[in-house]
Image: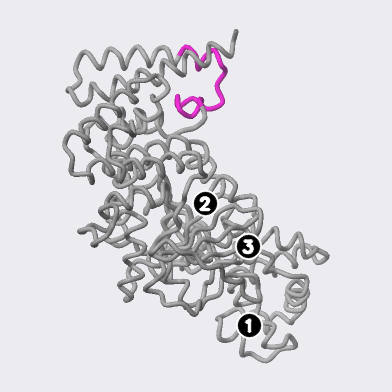
Amino acid sequence: MQPQVSERTAEGFREVLRRLSAPLQVAVAGRIKSGKSTLVNALIGRRVAPTDVGECTRLVTRFQYGTVDRVEVVFHDGGKQAIPFDADGGIPADLGIDLEKISHLEAYLTNAVLRDLTVIDTPGLGSLDAASVARTEELLGTRRGDGEAGDDLDPVSRNAVAGAEAVLYVVTQAVRADDQQALASFTAATASREAGPVNAIALLNKADTIEPDSVSESGGDVWTAATLIAGKQAQLLKPRVADVLPVIGLLAETAETGGFTSADADALRRLAALDEVTRETLLMSADLFTSWDCDVPAGVRTRLLERMDLYGIRHALAAIDAEPEITAGDLRRRLLDSSGLAGVMSRLDSVFRARADGIKAAAALASVTALAHASGDQGERQRVHDAIEVLLAKPEAHQLRLLEALTLVASGAVEMPEDLAEEVMRVGSASDVGEQLGLPGRGRQELTDYALERAGWWRSFSSFGATPAQSRIAHVVHRAYFLIWQHLRAQGT
């Protein structure tokens, strides 16, 4: 295709091809002070992203796998400058470089999780710093405008080529209209369609700050309350995200990155041994925890509070009460379990990793379309459009058709009866065959028969009773069931 397009478009295509063979790029985004960098550290398993106010919180930082740990400042003119890690092994909060000249930061780490996911930390949306917000908007594809003089691409094309392919969107208890708009614009930019739940998950961070008494049916339990709120937010954000998961980023970061030490465990044991009145007084508020007089030094208590907050401290003390001889390692694992990080990692696997190739391919098609559009050559646009149609007609491209159908139905662009829309969502979103068919745990023969039955039903629906738009969706779903049936039959031979 490249000889039939301009050199500028061809250069963009080469970058798109490179991205197809690279790890999936997942942005952690959200409003300012939502705890994004803390969650980035927890996901990576290393406290490397700065969480305090500083220059780096105003820049996009890409964390990717490398054989040697290093950090590079990437300038707008393409130049790069290596910078050292700070004394604690993280990216320094202050760079000593003019921020106006910096495009973004590239951090290469040996952490195994980055082998198949590039994690992107972003400045907070809603900040008073307009330049920082603009950097995040460009990455997420939510910024629109005219290209600057000298740019190779207009902003839409540049975002499609350089932006993220999937997003973990961090919310707190209140979901605002601009949160919904950011998610809608992001998925539109990366899927060439209106928003769908293919490449976005929301995280309800700081779940420990929720007052359980304010949530009916919580039974006074913080995590139950957080789970109920997350469920309501999932309905509010539907169909923008695949799920909303509660998480306590600070606790996850502390437990996963080595922030919890044997000295911390010893300090918690000393707190557990305090008399009941003193202990209950300490746990009433953060101020009392650090200021009330007791045998555990205030500085030690301040460190615990900074790393665990009162929720984590209460959980640790309860674990020590139940098992006085618990080791520091087991105590750390209990804290990690109570953070909700395991659920986040599981959904990362089922929503992102399991369909990474499809997500990247959809984003690549969005990029190619944007690149052709930026050329201004009508003939070039048509050639690219024709090439994409040829590609999508190939059997191996069916997953892209299914993702396209999913986003069309999820966004309401194609209206379907509720039960059929849910079936499209299930077939297009689930990674396990049993879950795709809505029959988890059933035997292979039952799954095989049901797949063939549904393939026939959707084929009939496409010809009788469906609108033209619904018919196109029905053909794709019929094909999906037929391919599942073929796969199950092959397993039995």
Q: Is residue 415 left or right of residue 458?
A: left
Which mark, by number, is residue 159?
A: none
Amino acid, disc 3: Arg
Amino acid, disc 1: Thr
The reply to whether discs 2 and 3 touch (Cβ–Cβ < 8 Å) is no
Q: For the residue carrying disc 3, how many other residues have a C-alpha within 10 Å: few (<14), some (14-19), or many (20+)?
A: many
Residue at point 33%, 43% (across, down): 367
Q: Is residue 2 left or right of residue 327?
A: left
Q: For the residue carrying disc 2, how many other residues have a C-alpha within 10 Å: few (<14), some (14-19), or many (20+)?
A: many
Q: Quadrant of residue 135?
A: bottom left
> Whole-Å distance between the Cαs marked 2 and 3?
14 Å
* Residue indicated by mark 2: 118
* Residue indicated by mark 3: 46
Amino acid, disc 2: Thr
Residue 132 seen by the camera = yes
281 or 316: nearer the viewer: 316
Q: Quadrant of residue 467?
A: top left
> Whole-Å distance between the Cαs marked 1 and 3?
22 Å
Q: Earlier in the sequence, mark 2 or mark 3?
A: 3
Residue at point 66%, 82% (across, down): 301
Q: Magenta span covers which residues? A: 433-449
Number of the front mark, 2 or 1: 2
> Whole-Å distance between the Cαs marked 2 and 1?
34 Å
Question: Label 2's element?
Answer: strand
Q: Is residue 373 left or right of residue 59?
A: left
* Residue indicated by mark 1: 302
Q: Position of residue 70 (x, y in %)?
A: 61, 63
**Quadrant that contains the C terminus:** top right
Q: Is residue 365 above or below residue 166?
A: above
28 or 267: nearer the viewer: 28
Q: Is residue 103 above or below residue 263?
A: above
